[in-house]
Image (spheres, helix red, strand yellow):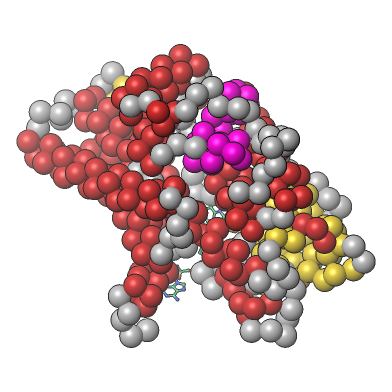
Amino acid sequence: MTTSAEFRYGVPQAQDWNALTDDAFRALVRDDFETHYPVAQRFPPRRLRWSENKDWYLRLAAKGWIAPAWPVEYGGMGLSPSKLLVYFEEQERCGMMRFQDHGILMVGPVLMKYGTEAQKRQYLPGILSCDAIWCQGYSEPNSGSDLASLSTRAVRDGDDFVITGQKIWTTLAHDATHMFALVRTDPDAKKQEGISFLLLDVHSPGVRVRPIRDIAGTEEFCEVFLDGVRTHHTNLVGELNRGWTVAKSLLGFERIFLGSPKLPEYGLLVLESLARARGLLDDPVFNDRFMSLKLDVAHLADIYGHYAAIVSRGESLGQDVSLLKVWASETFQRVADLVVETAGPLGGLSGNVSIGDETLNPLATFYKARVPTIYGGTSEIQRNILARQVLDLPG
Ligand SMILES: Cc1cc2nc3c(=O)[nH]c(=O)nc-3n(C[C@H](O)[C@H](O)[C@H](O)COP(=O)(O)OP(=O)(O)OC[C@H]3O[C@@H](n4cnc5c(N)ncnc54)[C@H](O)[C@@H]3O)c2cc1C
């Protein structure tokens, strides 16, 4: 740990949460969320924009609860894997939607591992206070699964790097203040070896953000055009041309988060409300399928706890973490499929529908379940990794 005594990241923790029993911690978190999380924002059918949910997340930031998995020394809650699961489960129980948390989930952990002391001091406080909202500039129009083929260039000019190119599918870039981006700094090297990891201010001259409308009619991701954008050379994270190593470690953090049981648990809650509204909770055929999915989600929570424990011991995740992402995303799809089927003909309608005493949006759950098998590396790519790098099958 390189933090010095006189510098404090974030808000001090009110107590050592890990000293509580899981049940006591759950009661405390549940009471806080139930009391304070706005009812109007529970179980939204789409991802909320920063202008819509910032009051809640600024409250969490002020309380020191914005980074549950970060070590206490860096301003996080320092939760153990079991407490982290409790925290996520309670967020899910009250229908709390993720915010634009790429700072907390991705660039923060990267800076803790690869950042200089100056970078940590410059950027971690803004992430913890939510003054800085980050987006992820990895994918390009011709580089998604084959990310290492990316062509956005960065050229050193005096004290700056000058970036030119295009990113795409950049989640909530229109709300972001900063981007962490993969850029090509040596076009002559082998493709993985000429890439660097740069931080930039989204409000710099030369950045243009254009939202993309998706099938559900919402605008959650964007194209980002970078035309001669300057960023100071001290915004290089890790070594020049060694950004692929940084990117891979970030993908590890991303895969464990994307493997959390949060989304399938959310799907089960929707399914249960729907079944209640349709009077199916005592139906043995429905219950057979419902219980089977519940068991799948329980197994997922178990294995998630196993990987979260590895991370909390400070150890690196192996390539086998890919199975977590496949299991989580595909389980969510199975749950969402049953949601639409259980809704019957109403499952095909967009927007809220009234079923029994409930107002629900089954199609939104179905749409929500399409994307996790794509972002963070598609299921096909995860299976390739498992086949080649874990099972050692011929490629
Ligand atoms: C909701 C959402 C949010 C996103 N947010 C971000 C973000 O914030 N920042 C960012 O940088 N990116 C983001 N992405 C982009 C995401 O990472 C890419 O969509 C993903 O990596 C796939 O790349 P692609 O879309 O170019 O598809 P392609 O790579 O063109 O793949 C198309 C199809 O071919 C298959 N395929 C490709 N190569 C192989 C192979 N070798 N073997 C077997 N099958 C293969 C894929 O599995 C897929 O089914 C987001 C995507 C979505 C859907």
Q: Residue at x 33, y 29 (%)?
A: 22
Q: Quick one: which residue is furthest to the left in this view?
A: 284
Q: Would you identify the image quadrant in which residue 133 lies?
A: top right
Q: Tell me if residue 157 comes above or below residue 190 in the rendering.
A: above
Q: Quick one: which residue is furthest to the top in this view?
A: 35
Q: Nearer the viewer, residue 220 or 297?
A: 297
Q: Quick one: which residue is furthest to the front in this view?
A: 5
Can residue 140 be seen here? The reply is: yes
Q: Tell me if residue 107 comes above or below residue 6 in the rendering.
A: below
Q: Nearer the viewer, residue 55 or 251?
A: 251
Can residue 125 be seen here? The reply is: no
Q: Tell me if residue 298 comes above or below residue 228 in the rendering.
A: above
- Residue 108 x %, y %: 61, 47
- Residue 31 x %, y %: 41, 16
Q: In this rendering, would 217 be left or right of 350?
A: right
Q: Residue at x 83, y 50 (%)?
A: 204
- Residue 367 x %, y %: 42, 46
Identify the magenta region: 57-77
Q: Would you identify the image quadrant in which residue 373 lies?
A: bottom left
Tally the marks.
0
Q: Residue at x 27, y 46 (%)?
A: 302
Q: Quadrant of the C terminus?
A: bottom left
- Residue 144 x %, y %: 55, 67
Q: In this rendering, would 89 be left or right of 289?
A: right
Q: Would you identify the image quadrant in which residue 151 lies?
A: bottom right
Q: Residue at x 40, y 71 (%)?
A: 385
Magenta segment includes 121: no
